[in-house]
């Protein structure tokens, strides 16, 4: 086929042909990703040097482009949508969500204003409303979809800063003012780094954040929070927000949100809840308690792209004070003014352009149904329980944190080694497992101890995968000698 690309980049016939081919490729991939190693075998620079230094001057045939994708790009990828990806948080780009992305890219609509794509705006309201009801948040919470939880938390904390309206930060800013005290945000030492990044971005600095100690179950110590706020108030510091986490990144621990809400209400401080990973699991009756007290939060973020089978990116920010969020961000230049009385989603964050993310979430919610989602979440938790049992059954292994959901944190601890050697042994063990490229695990540090994490969240992961991992991991660990320490 000649490489003539018309103005449209591809003729309709060619699009149909390659579109079908790529759907076949995607269906083949999804039918059994275990054929491919989850981790690539590449060194830094390998992929870059295999590619031309300059873009082609003339159109290239799709066959050549796809061949290079299969030959150079695919083997250099870490396969996140893979049943043996158990690092960080394991996620799923499910088939209904993938098809939703196809529509979003095909129509390329922009839901910045209601008028620039009415159905995209309203579907976002409907889909985030369905999810809100399913996880048991009150109907007073309004949702808006962002790219990531990092953006959602940044926007929530910008709203918190706006909530302290007497400071007039929207109008006057923060720099060069002697009439603004130091502002403070509080979160636990187990909170996600996106909270710290938001403090940096908002001009509060590292000194603008206090990390509150976590208890032995890795939950925020509420009496320490209370003491920190009282101390700050006595010192003339202005508390503006507390971030509670439901499902922390290292151990998935759940902060006592209701008790934190008591403190926030006493001092009229914005409460933001980070439920990026665990939010969807509140759909299960037996886990509904995790959002206890969240009806009193001012905002909450949860990521359908994490544990709700929606391809990245899709993060939902809920708030029951949308007018404050809007006050923090709304700025309408002449060319964006409209006469329609409707909600314009560009007003609720930094981005003007907003891709059509609601369609994939809506596809997922409809195609799985809430019961289908519940069955899948329960299965992940069940597999994680099995893994925890296997670990607890071995005297030379140790579970390092209570398992709340589908993440297990543990370490290998043979008798007679000091703490530092145990840390180094586990770092070696993790590196050796990942070097096989059959499974991908990651690590964290818990109360100073190096911990290996197994995170379950991909729909294709089966108990068999974990049984194979566990048997290999035990053998590996026990064959390590002190000479292997790094
Ligand atoms: C993953 C995670 C985040 C960050 O999510 P992004 O969407 O990648 O920004 C924030 N908080 C928690 C608790 C998380 O687990």
Image (cartoon, rainbow, N blue to C red):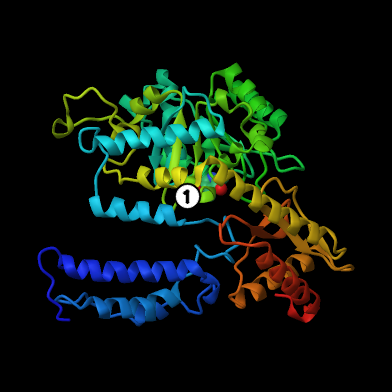
Q: Residue at point 43% right, 25% down?
A: 180
Q: Nearer the viewer, residue 175 or 112?
A: 112
Is ligand 1 within 8 Å of the beta carbon of the residue shown at mark 1?
yes
Task: Give the camera-side residue of 24 and 251.
Answer: 24
The residue drawn where x is 47% and y is 56% is: 94
Judging by the rendered image, the residue that carries numbered circle 1 is: 305
Q: How many marks?
A: 1
Q: Position of residue 44 (x, y in %)?
A: 45, 76
- Check the image and report above or below for 13 versus 374: below
Dividing the picture into quadrants, the one containing residue 22 is bottom left
Q: Is residue 192 visible?
A: no
Of 278 and 24, nearer the camera is 24
Q: Quadrant of the N terminus?
A: bottom left
Regarding residue 458, the answer to whether it shows in the image is yes
Please report the residue visible at 12 percent of the width from the left and 75 percent of the height from the top: 4
In the rendered structure, the answer to whether residue 316 lies left or right of residue 427 reads left
Q: Position of residue 287 (x, y in %)?
A: 66, 37
Give the image location of residue 467, x and y in percent: 72, 67
Residue at (45, 47) in percent of width and height: 367
Who is closer to the viewer here, 467 or 294?
Answer: 467
The location of residue 268, given as percent across then percent down, is 54, 18
Element type at marker 1?
A: helix
Give the quarter of the image for residue 328: top left
Quadrant (top left/top right/bottom left/bottom right) for the C terminus:
bottom right
Query: Mark 1: few, some, or many residues within 10 Å (few <14, many ≥20)?
Result: many
């Amino acid at each position: 086929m000649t490489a003539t690309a018309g103005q449209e980049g591809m003729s309709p016939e060619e699009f149909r042909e390659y579109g079908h081919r790529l759907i076949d490729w995607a269906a083949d991939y999804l039918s059994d990703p275990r054929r491919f190693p989850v981790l690539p075998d590449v060194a830094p620079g390998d992929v870059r040097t295999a590619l031309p230094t300059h873009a082609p001057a003339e159109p290239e045939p799709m066959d050549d482009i796809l061949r290079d994708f299969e030959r150079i790009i695919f083997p250099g990828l870490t396969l996140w949508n893979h049943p043996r990806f158990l690092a960080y948080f394991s996620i799923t780009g499910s088939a209904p969500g993938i098809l939703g992305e196809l529509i979003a890219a095909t129509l390329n609509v922009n839901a910045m204003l209601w008028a620039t794509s009415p159905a995209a705006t309203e579907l976002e309201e409907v889909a985030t409303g369905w999810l809100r009801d399913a996880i048991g948040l009150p109907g007073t919470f309004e949702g808006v979809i962002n790219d990531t939880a990092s953006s959602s938390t940044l926007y929530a904390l910008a709203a918190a800063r706006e909530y302290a309206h007497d400071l007039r930060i929207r109008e006057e800013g923060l720099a060069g003012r002697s009439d603004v005290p130091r502002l403070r945000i509080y979160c636990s030492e187990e909170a996600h780094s996106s909270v710290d990044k938001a403090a940096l971005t908002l001009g509060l600095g590292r000194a603008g954040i206090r990390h509150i100690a976590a208890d032995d179950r890795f939950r925020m110590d509420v009496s320490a929070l209370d003491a920190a706020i009282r101390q700050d108030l006595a010192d003339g510091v202005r508390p503006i927000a507390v971030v509670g986490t439901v499902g922390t990144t290292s151990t998935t621990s759940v902060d006592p949100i209701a008790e934190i809400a008591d403190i926030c209400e006493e001092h009229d401080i914005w409460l933001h809840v980070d439920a990026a990973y665990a939010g969807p699991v509140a759909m299960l009756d037996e886990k509904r308690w995790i959002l206890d007290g969240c009806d009193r939060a001012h905002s909450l973020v949860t990521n359908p792209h994490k544990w709700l089978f929606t391809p990245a990116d899709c993060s939902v920010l809920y708030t029951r004070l949308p007018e404050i969020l809007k006050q923090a961000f709304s700025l309408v230049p002449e060319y964006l003014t409209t006469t329609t009385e409707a909600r314009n989603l560009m007003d609720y964050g930094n981005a003007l352009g907003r891709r059509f993310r609601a369609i994939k979430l809506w596809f997922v919610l409809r195609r799985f149904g809430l019961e289908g989602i519940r069955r899948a979440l329960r299965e992940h938790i069940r597999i994680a329980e099995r893994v925890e049992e296997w670990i607890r059954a071995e005297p030379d292994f140790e579970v390092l944190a209570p398992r709340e959901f589908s993440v297990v944190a543990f370490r290998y601890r043979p008798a007679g080694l000091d703490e530092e050697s145990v840390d180094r042994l586990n770092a070696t063990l993790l590196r050796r497992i990942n070097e096989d490229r059959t499974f991908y695990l990651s690590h964290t540090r818990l109360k100073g101890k190096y911990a290996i994490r197994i995170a379950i969240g991909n729909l294709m992961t089966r108990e068999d995968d974990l049984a194979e991992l566990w048997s290999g991991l035990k053998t590996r660990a026990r064959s390590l000698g002190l000479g292997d320490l790094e």
